[in-house]
Image (cartoon, helix red, strand yellow):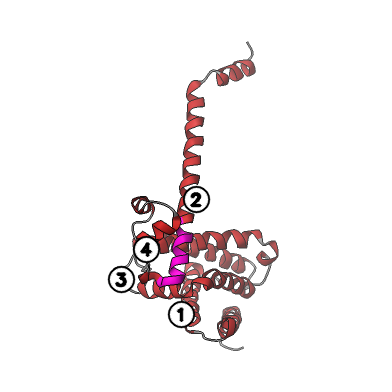
Amino acid sequence: MSILTYMITAKKKNPKQQKSGARAKKTGKREQNKERTKERILRAALELFKEKGLEGTTTKEISRRSGIAEGTLFNYFKTKEDLALYFFQKETEDLIRWFRADARLQKAPLAEKLFAIIHRQLEYIEPYEDFIGAVFWRSLQPTSMLSPLSFESQEMRLKYIRFIREILAEAEEKEEIPRVGGLGAYGVGLFYLGIVTYWLQDGSRRKQKTLALLDRALLFGTQVLKKGSWEW
């Protein structure tokens, strides 16, 4: 018997490998079903948050709207803050997928990239402005899991910071900006929070004042970094 024949025969007769593959397939399907349920709950919650606000919505209403038992809901999300964290997790994942699928944007200047990224984030949260406002003010409470200092929010925030760091590192290699390191990525994160704060207070049509501020601030900021001075 040749080595090749032996390997093929052994593979066919290995029941442990077959069982292992079946278990992996079953686990993968279970995880997919779990994720779909979480997304269904989130959609129902966002609808209710839009209608009643974060504080005015109960977990019982969320479970009814999503078509699952309240006890099952708690298996996925123990609190409304857990739901909020999942919302921002999905936003970050959606943002990264969107950016990496846009070949033209990846070749654009840094200011254009950052404008497009933050604009995309604002578009994502725009339908849920009242909910975002409530979550934002909750995040200022040190005891809240939505706080930037909480362990629960760290993984999601670091994923975003690493994404921004990759973009800044690319700009450094092209000599668009000097070396800013990880501090630059944290700076962009803080800048985004500042823009969201302004956006929440912006009463202009379609938030045009926020977009104008975003555009000018990014152009100014990248020019300052590139020139190493405040000269416009």
Tag 1–tag 2 contact (CB < 8 Å)? no
Q: Is residue 18 above or below residue 187?
A: above
What amino acid is labelled 3 in the image? Answer: Pro
Tag 3–tag 2 contact (CB < 8 Å)? no
Residue that badge 2 annotates: 36
CA neighbours of label 4 inside 10 A, class few (<14), some (14 to 19), many (20+): some
Q: Name which of mark 4 and mark 1 comes first in the sequence.
A: 4
Of the 4 image quadrants, the one containing the N terminus is top right
Secondary structure category for the residue under label 4: helix
- Look at the magenta stretch and give its main secondary structure: helix
Q: Position of residue 159 (x, y in %)?
A: 48, 60
How much space separates mark 3 and mark 4, taking CA atoms? 17 Å
Residue that badge 4 annotates: 80
How much space separates mark 3 and mark 2, taking CA atoms? 32 Å
**What is the magenta range?**
41-53
Residue that badge 1 annotates: 197
Q: Position of residue 195 (x, y in %)?
A: 50, 79
